[in-house]
Image (cartoon, grey):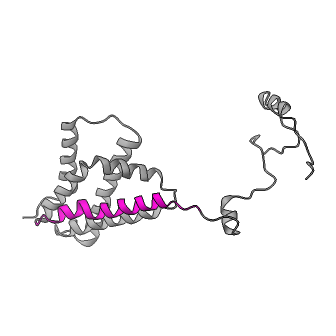
Amino acid sequence: YRAVRAVDLAAVKLLVERRRAIPFVRYDEDRCCAPDFVYGYGDAVGDGVCRPLAFRLLDATLRRWEHADAEDLMAQVDRIVDPRERLEELFRRTSREMRSHVIYSALLKALDHPAVQPVMQRVSQRRIQYLAVAFRSLGLARREAMDRARLAYSAYVGFLQLMLQLRLQRMESAEFEGYVEHVVATLIPAPQH
């Protein structure tokens, strides 16, 4: 094949360093190169030119994490008979699961990944539903229990965002324990006599 246009790379480097336009290249209003044609990954997969990327290790890791999330902590606290004690223990144990917090926080950052988003959606829905059932067992009406569950879960996710992603100053142990007890007292309604 014969090249229609030739570009002297030394001249291109000189033009770029001097912030001048490169001959034969179109620019948009932001002075960025504007391609004549774009054929992206999605187009290539759609046309059958290439296969979709498979993230087998990521998929397996997400499945394992999702299964462990459902089985481990919830199964442990489900052994507690008294509904109030069960919910209080869930809040306290959840607050101490640092490894889980780090994983969850990292997955929140990756919500735009097609393998991560559906898993996070399922895990979040399952956790909120679990909390709603726990609040219902305390005698709250269905709507109030769901509202309380969403509030509790939002507080959990928001706290993770503040501490792990925004990297706010870490609390001392006593301060953190006090915060957890405040969350328990605030979000779990007092017993009705």
Specify the segment rendered in magenta. Answer: 53-81
State the count of labels.
Answer: 0
Quarter location, residue 16: top right
103 displayed left or right of 143: right
The answer to whether residue 124 shows anywhere in this view is no
Residue at figure coordinates x 18%, y 60% from the top left: 87
**Quick check: is 71 in the magenta stretch?**
yes
Q: Residue furthest bottom?
A: 142
Q: Residue furthest left?
A: 193
Residue 142: where, in percent of width, then height? 26, 72
Name the residue nearer the viewer: 79 or 54. Answer: 54
Residue 71: where, in percent of width, then height? 26, 64
The answer to whether residue 5 shows anywhere in this view is yes
Magenta-drawn stretch, dominant element (helix, strand or loop): helix
Relative vertical location of residue 134 with respect to residue 184 in this rendering, above or below = below
Residue at figure coordinates x 13%, y 58% from the top left: 190
Name the residue nearer the viewer: 183 or 108. Answer: 108
Residue at figure coordinates x 17%, y 56% from the top left: 88
Relative vertical location of residue 155 with respect to residue 70 in this rendering, above or below = above
Residue 121: where, in percent of width, then height? 41, 63
**Quick check: is 152 in the magenta stretch?**
no
164 displayed left or right of 75: right
Q: If the image is split into quadrants, where does the C terminus sit?
A: bottom left
Q: Residue furthest front?
A: 1
147 displayed left or right of 59: left
Name the residue nearer the viewer: 34 or 189. Answer: 34
Quarter location, residue 61: bottom left
